Image (tube, rainbow, N blue to C red):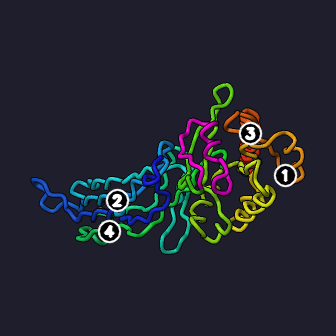
Amino acid sequence: MAKANFVDYVKINLTSGDGGAGSRHFYRAKGIPKGGPDGGDGGRGGHIILRGNRNLWTLLQFKYKKHIRAEHGQRGSENNKTGSTGADVVLDVPLGTIARDAETQEILFEITRHGEQQVILEGGRGGLGNSHFKSSTNQSPDYAQPGEPGTEGWYILELKVLADVGLVGLPNVGKSTLLSVVTAAKPEIANYAFTTLVPNIGMVQYRDGKSFAMADIPGIIKGAHEGKGLGHRFLRHIERNATLLFCIPADADDIRGQYRILLSELRNYNPELLDKPRVLALTRADMVDEELKRLRAGEIPDDLPHLYVSAITGEGITHLKDLLYKMIIEEREYYDGVQLSMEEE
């Protein structure tokens, strides 16, 4: 995905349709010069709806079209005919999109499933025709309701990449190279920091036709939780990853120190991120021999599973896939059980 084409935050102006006015018509026919009221109701104004689309990975479509309006409902007519409903506007968005009120910053909802639809702005209701107001004391009401006006406002759409596994690490630790080896993704790779400026998504093909999604999140720097660099923008994508794969070079000067920095940034940004299952991949394993691995065993954090991997030699790649898939399945089964318990209650 080209850097210029990845957009994960937009502010857009939305206006739903006005409801149509009710009709104040009276029935007229040959021999019936003064029939009763038969004015129909006005049609509802068009809603604005967000719909999840698993084939989209960016909010780019909204970068150049920030003002979106739905159609107005039509006014009612004679013979109690209801006016046509204004056409809804359906906006396809990537999975992981959050809708937020720009003024209050309130989160309205999030789209997480393909085909899921949420109304972000309702159209105005149509007005009632004069036939609704006929009574024993008023046989000929000469009035009807106007349509309810639509609603206008500014809204924020914010994308948090959905993936089964998120790669977490400092800049230039081999995350993109690892992603390119275990998936079909083709991220830009170079030997300098911040090669990755936008998340890259790849599908890991596992055994028996199974697969899972892996996301290479741009490198975290110290102070990212305070917004340094593009900290907030990067960190929010990690929130949607079920399992976190920490990547630290096997030949790093201070493995435990890098791990502490990453944990600290995640904790300060959102403490709940530390509840996610995590694995440590010691990348560039081809740069260290078995003796050095033994000597550095005490430097490796002992509170999480770890393994050495090399995108060059293939060392540990199959083991890594097995471990990640096992953790993903366990996590899915756990949340399915929680969801079932909530439904039973």
Q: Which of pointers 4 and 2 lies earlier in the amino acid sequence?
A: 2
State the extent of the magenta-drawn residues as a range. 168-192
- Whether residue 332 appears in magenta in the rendering, the answer is no
Mark 1 surroundings within 10 Å by alpha-carbon count, few (fewer than 14), some (14 through 19), many (20 or more):
some
Q: Is residue 217 visible?
A: yes
Q: Residue at x 38, y 61 (%)?
A: 123
Residue 65 is tagged as 2
Q: Please give left or right for residue 286 compared with residue 25 in the image.
A: right
Q: Which residue is mark 3?
A: 286
Q: Quadrant of residue 261?
A: bottom right
Q: Please give left or right for residue 124 compared with residue 187 in the image.
A: left
Residue 136 is tagged as 4
Mark 3 surroundings within 10 Å by alpha-carbon count, few (fewer than 14), some (14 through 19), many (20 or more):
some
Q: Quadrant of residue 130?
A: bottom left
Chief SS of the magenta region: loop
Depth check: give the residue in front, 145 or 249. Answer: 249
3D distance between C-alphas at marks 4 and 2: 53 Å
Q: Residue 290, how many percent across, how many down? A: 85, 39
Element type at mark 1: loop
